[in-house]
Image: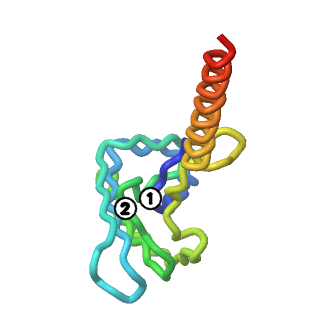
Amino acid sequence: MVVKKGPEITAKLHNVKPVMFGKLSIDSKITKKNRSTVLVHKKVNNYQVAPNSSFDYLVSDSSNQLGAGKYTLDMHLQSGKRKWHLVKDFVITSKQGAPLTKQTGWLGISMMLWIVVIILILIIASLVAVIMWQRKKLKS
């Protein structure tokens, strides 16, 4: 069962130098493009980044719900005296921005449909049992 409230926004960060970065702090914010109101804010500390490596940094989490639109990701990174400021615009399409709240069950059919089918089967089985019991009672 998958329950998601919106798209997950990740930033792929690269350490292209043969240097290890320790105690890396990342302060990231997502705003609507050309707006100042922060929609998503995430701050982490004490990250370690290996030399000549890359990793996906998850900016949003499941409680943040971003709809379709144009956004800006603004990130400040610092490790010791080294500082970086990254800004990237991105677009979420209407298909990507729609919350994925549909709960699917067996064979990709929604859970609600399975519940209705099971209830109908139980009702029909109960009716058949009552009819058979009545017939048996009448024959006796």
Q: How is the image coloured?
A: rainbow
For marks 1 and 2, give the CA distance: 7 Å
Q: Amino acid at mark 2?
A: Asn
Residue 126 position in % (x across, y down): 58, 29
Does 125 sit left or right of 112 as displayed?
A: right
Q: Residue furthest top?
A: 140
As rendered, which of 77 and 135 lies closer to the eye?
135
Task: Name the residue carrying label 2.
Answer: 64
Of labels 1 and 2, earlier in sequence is 1
Residue 10 position in % (x across, y down): 50, 58
1 and 2 marks in contact (CB < 8 Å): yes
Does 49 sit left or right of 18 as displayed?
A: left
User: In which image quadrant can residue 127 be found?
Assistant: top right
Q: Secondary structure at mark 1?
A: loop
Instruction: Please give the name of the residue rendered at 58% of the width and 68% of the height, measured from the top-left corner.
Output: 96
Q: Secondary structure at mark 2?
A: loop
Instruction: Please give the name of the residue rendered at 57% of the width and 76% of the height, measured from the top-left corner.
Output: 94
Q: Residue furthest right?
A: 107
Does 128 sit left or right of 13 as displayed?
A: right
Q: How many residues crowd mark 2 within 10 Å: few (<14), some (14–19), many (20+)?
A: some
Tell me: residue 22, above or below residue 65.
Answer: above
Instruction: Please give the name of the residue rendered at 29% of the width and 74% of the height, measured from the top-left corner.
Output: 38
